[in-house]
């Protein structure tokens, strides 16, 4: 029986043949692809004298088939999973971890790399080649190449356990999210909710066989509007506590012990490799360089933001008291009264804006913005197979019609999709035998679904999320490097958010909004006065939001720099870390760490600070666009060449200076956030 994953893909642009792939194909395909990759490594080791081409370059190209197949599998596990795929992930993940360790701990292979590295000053390498050599050597050293045999066995064991624990953590969060539902039987309990949200909740109830009722879930497009608009305080509390106690209830889905186990393993791994903590290990390969630099950065921001945050909270407290006699503002009250206050102060809210942000128009808008800036075009191609009927696939071309990329877009919540929004890649860009292999890139979101009477109408926050993830996608799609491991988003983690976060800025500019923000019924463009209100409201509660983000960054750093043997109780540790930063009364039973997927399932461990770090870069970089014009071709070309297309060919600080002409200054962020 043939396995489509092991055939040459006879699809447009050699895209993943989702229409032919069955779950049963993955395990044999990955096992076969591991053997192919091993033979590629053996071929490298069999070469005579090691040099840059036959060792470093060849290693970067090895395992291409395995990388493609495993990316298909793990992307499905995130966006369209089921029990069968999850069971398979627990079997496949250790195989890939072991294979990765086989390469990184191979003495003969490392000896060849070391020989090339020791001659690096005499090899006349290009900037990109020198970066690849440095990265390859460091990745081997940082992952155990210099350990003795006993230590290498220990490292393998740790990596195996970590891969399993991370998968289980994510599965528990997804199951907790899926199993909860708030069923409302009395329409009076939905006071304050917009009709569109009520209709979506009624439609969900019908789908679940609960006709005549309304169902709200922990999926963001359901949870957030309820917390923002529902006047029923007791139901807000119920939903808030359900959302903030995910995987922490002491049952089979509890993640507290998994967190402690992961922290101990990460710490043990770091010490084995000669580092004091996991944070020290991670930050060595970041722009920030070390833990003290991250803490200094976050605490400096906190010092400027906290007084404003306290003012923000006091303003909402006074408003809630005046409105409804609320004596003690609770966490489940904040979004509701904050939104009411924003509406009063700025005469703008999401429901006023939604009609102008029909999803299809917003997609068209993000495409047009990219075309005006970077000269690329998007055309839907229904011949490209997709993994779900809700997914769209596009061919991306330049102005001359040359193929640039394949782009997938997946926008609505499903039971098999984890919460949040992310960009991912199926195939990276690289030069292979003189041919430019173009990338296959995807964004996955959880946006407001259409109802029987209305199309998908986005909140303004969902619009900025679309632009954010699309910024990541541009980083992948416009890649123009020689080596895949330095291409696209393969950059330092605290630099990777620059392309995404800068792209959000266009959402606030009239000349961009005029491209797509049109009323879904009348076709009328968004009025200029409404755009002004959006801009004025942009800094609303920025002190509070900044402190909230900083608190997550500090919690992450605390988890990954503290001796985990001192963390006996995850709840107590979180409460203790957040105590000095809390702006609202503590809710005893809540615990966010057990669903903090960014740091315990994703790649943000000791890296959550990077969102704020990149905000400094994006505010500073966008200031140049504001000076020259937001569609200025010279500035856009420079950003494309020095940031988006450059990938990781040089250190991010070098690339940034090539674009900006100087080091970034934090003033632009502080000014934009209204903190100075």
Image (cartoon, rainbow, N blue to C red):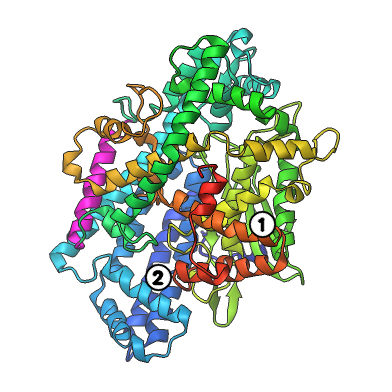
* Magenta-colored stretch includes residue 246: no
**Badge 2, how many Cα within 10 Å: few under 14, some, many 20+?**
many
| Residue 139 against residue 434 in the figure, above or below | above
| Dot in front, 1 or 2 | 1
In the image, taking residue 113 as reference, residue 491 lies left or right, namely right
Percent across and percent down for residue 618 are: 55, 55
Q: Are marks 1 and 2 in contact (CB under 8 Å)?
A: no
Mostly what secondary structure, the magenta segment? helix
Q: Nearer the viewer, residue 259 or 380?
A: 259
Q: What residue lies at 78% left-to-right and 49% top-to-bottom?
A: 515
Q: What residue lies at 43% left-to-right and 57% top-to-bottom?
A: 494
Percent across and percent down for residue 116 are: 32, 85
Report the Cα–Cα distance between label 1 and label 2: 48 Å
The answer to whether residue 606 is seen in the rendering is no
The answer to whether residue 134 is seen in the rendering is yes
Where does label 1 land, which residue?
A: 626
Report the span colored magenta.
254-274
Q: What residue lies at 73% left-to-right and 60% top-to-bottom?
A: 371
Q: Secondary structure at mark 1?
A: helix
Q: What residue lies at 34% left-to-right and 78% top-to-bottom?
A: 42
* Magenta-colored stretch includes residue 264: yes
Q: Nearer the viewer, residue 83 or 406?
A: 406
Where does label 2 land, which residue?
A: 37
Q: Secondary structure at mark 2?
A: helix
Quadrant of residue 475 within the rendered picture: bottom right
Q: Nearer the viewer, residue 665 or 117?
A: 665
């Amino acid at each position: 029986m043939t396995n489509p994953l092991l055939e040459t893909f006879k699809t447009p642009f050699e895209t993943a043949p989702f229409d032919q792939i069955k779950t049963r194909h993955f395990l044999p395909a990955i096992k076969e692809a591991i053997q192919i990759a091993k033979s590629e490594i053996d071929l490298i080791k069999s070469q005579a004298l090691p040099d840059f081409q036959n060792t470093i370059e060849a290693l970067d190209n090895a395992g291409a088939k395995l990388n493609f197949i495993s990316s298909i599998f793990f992307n499905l596990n995130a966006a369209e999973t089921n029990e069968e795929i999850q069971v398979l992930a627990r079997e496949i993940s250790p195989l890939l971890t072991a294979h990765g360790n086989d390469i990184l701990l191979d003495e003969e292979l490392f000896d060849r790399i070391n020989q090339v590295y020791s001659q690096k000053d005499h090899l006349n390498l290009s900037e990109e080649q020198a970066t690849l050599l440095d990265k390859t050597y460091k990745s081997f050293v940082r992952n155990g190449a210099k350990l003795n045999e006993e230590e290498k066995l220990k490292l393998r064991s740790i990596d195996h356990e970590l891969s399993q624990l991370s998968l289980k953590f994510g599965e528990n969060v997804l199951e907790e999210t899926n199993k909860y539902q708030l069923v409302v039987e009395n329409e009076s309990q939905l006071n304050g909710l917009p009709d569109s949200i009520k209709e979506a909740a009624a439609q969900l109830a019908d789908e679940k066989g609960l006709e005549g009722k309304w169902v709200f879930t922990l999926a963001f497009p359901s949870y957030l509007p309820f917390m923002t608009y529902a006047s029923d305080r007791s139901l807000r509390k119920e939903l808030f506590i359900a959302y903030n106690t995910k995987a922490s209830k002491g049952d089979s889905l509890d993640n507290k012990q998994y967190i402690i186990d992961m922290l101990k393993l990460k710490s043990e791994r770091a010490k084995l490799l000669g580092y004091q903590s996991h944070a020290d290990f991670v930050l060595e390969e970041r722009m920030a360089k070390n833990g003290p630099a991250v803490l200094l950065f976050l605490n400096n921001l906190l010092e400027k933001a906290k007084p404003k945050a306290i003012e923000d909270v006091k303003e909402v407290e006074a408003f809630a008291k005046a409105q409804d006699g609320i004596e003690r503002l609770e966490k489940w009250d904040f979004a509701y009264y904050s939104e009411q206050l924003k509406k009063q102060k700025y005469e703008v809210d999401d429901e006023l804006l939604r009609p102008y942000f029909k999803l299809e128009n917003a997609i068209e808008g993000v495409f047009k913005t990219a075309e005006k800036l970077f000269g690329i075009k998007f055309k839907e191609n229904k011949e490209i197979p997709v993994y779900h009927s809700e997914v769209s696939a596009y061919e991306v071309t330049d102005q001359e019609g040359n193929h640039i990329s394949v782009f997938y877009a997946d926008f609505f919540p499903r039971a098999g999709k984890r919460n949040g929004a992310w960009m991912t890649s199926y195939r990276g860009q690289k030069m292979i035998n003189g041919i430019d292999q173009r990338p296959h890139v995807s964004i996955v979101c959880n946006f407001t679904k259409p109802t029987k009477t209305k199309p998908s109408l986005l909140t303004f926050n969902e619009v900025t999320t679309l632009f954010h993830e699309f910024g990541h996608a541009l980083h992948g799609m416009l890649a123009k490097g020689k080596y895949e491991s330095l291409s696209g988003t393969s950059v330092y983690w605290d630099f990777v958010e620059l392309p995404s976060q800068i792209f959000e800025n266009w959402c606030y500019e009239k000349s961009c909004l005029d491209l797509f923000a049109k009323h879904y019924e009348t076709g009328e463009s968004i009025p200029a006065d409404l755009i002004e209100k959006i801009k004025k409201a942009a800094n609303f509660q920025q002190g509070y939001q900044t402190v909230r983000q900083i608190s997550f960054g500090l919690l992450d750093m605390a988890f990954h720099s503290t001796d985990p043997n001192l963390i006996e109780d995850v709840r107590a540790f979180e409460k203790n870390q957040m105590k000095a930063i809390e702006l609202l009364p503590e809710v005893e039973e809540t615990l966010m760490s057990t669903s903090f997927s960014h740091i315990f399932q994703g790649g943000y461990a000791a890296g959550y600070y990077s969102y704020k770090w990149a905000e400094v870069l994006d505010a500073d970089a966008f200031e140049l666009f504001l000076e020259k014009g937001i569609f200025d071709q010279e500035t856009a070309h420079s950003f494309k060449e020095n940031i988006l297309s450059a990938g990781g060919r040089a250190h991010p600080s070098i690339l940034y200076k090539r674009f900006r002409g100087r080091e970034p200054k934090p003033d632009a962020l502080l000014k934009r956030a209204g903190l100075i």
